[in-house]
Image (cartoon, rainbow, N blue to C red):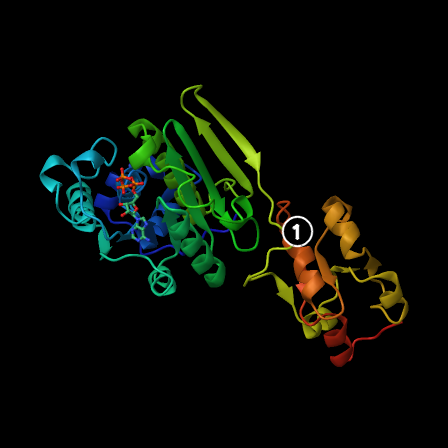
Amino acid sequence: MRALVEPGPELTAAQRDRWSRHLLLPEIGELGQRRLLNARVLVVGAGGLGSPALLYLAAAGVGTIGVVDDDVVETSNLQRQVLHGTADVGRAKVDSAADAVARLDPGITVVRHRERLTSASAARIVAGYDLVLDGSDTFETRYLVNDALVAAGRPWVWGAVLRFDGHVSVFDPAGATYRDLFPTAPPPGTVPGCGEAGVLGGVCAAVASVMVTEAVKLLTGAGRPLLGRVLVHDALAMTWRELPLRADPRRAGPTHLPTVTAADLLTRPGAVVVDVREPDERARGAIPGSLALPLGELLADPGALPAGPVVLHCARGSRSAEAVRAVLATGRTDVAHLEGGFAAWRAAGGPAH
Ligand SMILES: Nc1ncnc2c1ncn2[C@@H]1O[C@H](COP(=O)(O)OP(=O)(O)OP(=O)(O)O)[C@@H](O)[C@H]1O
């Protein structure tokens, strides 16, 4: 997997000492630590998930950490929001978070966003960060985070907790997102929050720990991210189950899909070209050497697609976009689609038979 962040400057002797246990890990090493120090990560909510996540992000050496939260610390938060102490009750959570991070490592920059993430502010706030961790507690905020990052074309890490249960995943605009897991919010009042149903502190820590581990992996390019998979934690049974999550190919909305132009395809052949149009459209003209796999067949069985790299095309680009989304959701990364479809190919002087 490609690291989300470029490495920053060489480590100093003090930094080498501080993160020596990371440097021993070949998957992180000096380069990975320089990436972490150069990274900008936003945590939405300094609550049950955000509190342990912020501490572990800071300890890991994530150089710039943004915190967005408009709330103040309450006594009932302290049972799980371990970033805040008794003396912080009544203080803004972002201020308490910044102080806790400074105690851990004054070299980490904390950006305080003491405000509500809204549809008006979400795009502006997330724009300044390489990666977002969503530790919010409402469907409304999760959809806001989802839509802002889909529009920005960037992955994010999501977690949720209630009672003894936790959920965690990594979403990506090119694959499955929160809207594939919850296409619509449940009616108000049908799903209780931690304030009504309770939550165990250790469950918050467990889920936040997975969130930070995924963040470190994404930032440094280590391992296989939790993309297209949702971990479901049941602390009473002490189980972690993994559920596959696929992008709904009918999902509308802005996405940044891998795309090639007709000019690219003409000058750099080499890819297997797959035509997802119907046989009658193909009969009227097709790209020489292309294979036929109508969209319906491909959606029913994405495994029918030949080995890549593959460029999918349709008449103008919308069916091929749907096809690419479905194939990416299976975990394949070697697919793209032809911008503007067969029409663009002909307009660029591409041959047909
Ligand atoms: N849109 C948003 N903008 C800013 N902060 C948000 C937004 N949505 C949620 N949050 C913050 O996310 C945090 C979620 O934390 P948590 O789930 O532990 O709930 P809590 O509100 O702190 O506690 P409780 O539900 O027990 O009262 C809260 O601090 C909340 O203020």
Q: Residue at x 60, y 55 (%)?
A: 251
Q: Nearer the viewer, residue 34 or 230?
A: 230
Q: Nearer the viewer, residue 224 or 209?
A: 209
Q: Exactly how many numbered labels are in the figure?
A: 1
Q: Is residue 188 visible?
A: yes
Residue 236 image offset from top left, x and y in percent: 41, 20
Left/right of residue 115 with respect to residue 118 in the rendered view: left
Left/right of residue 80 with respect to residue 281 in the rendered view: left
* Ligand 1 image-quadrant field: top left
Q: Secondary structure at mark 1?
A: helix
Kind of residue indicated by mark 1 = Ala
* Disc 1 within 8 angstroms of ligand 1 (CB): no
Q: Residue at x 64, y 48 (%)?
A: 332
Q: Is residue 177 visible?
A: no
In the picture, the quarter occupied by the C terminus is bottom right
Residue lying at the far left in this picture: please name it. 87
Q: Residue at x 24, y 49 (%)?
A: 12
Q: Residue at x 31, y 27 (%)?
A: 202
Residue 150 image offset from top left, x and y in percent: 49, 58
Q: Nearer the viewer, residue 290 or 330?
A: 330
Residue 307 image offset from top left, x and y in percent: 74, 49
Left/right of residue 203 with respect to residue 332 in the rendered view: left
Which quarter of the figure has residue 78? top left
Residue 203 image offset from top left, x and y in percent: 35, 29
Residue lying at the far top in this picture: please name it. 237
Q: Residues within 10 Å of mark 1 (few under 14, many from 20)?
A: many
Which quarter of the figure has residue 286? bottom right
Q: Nearer the viewer, residue 268 or 344?
A: 344
Q: Which residue is mark 1?
A: 326
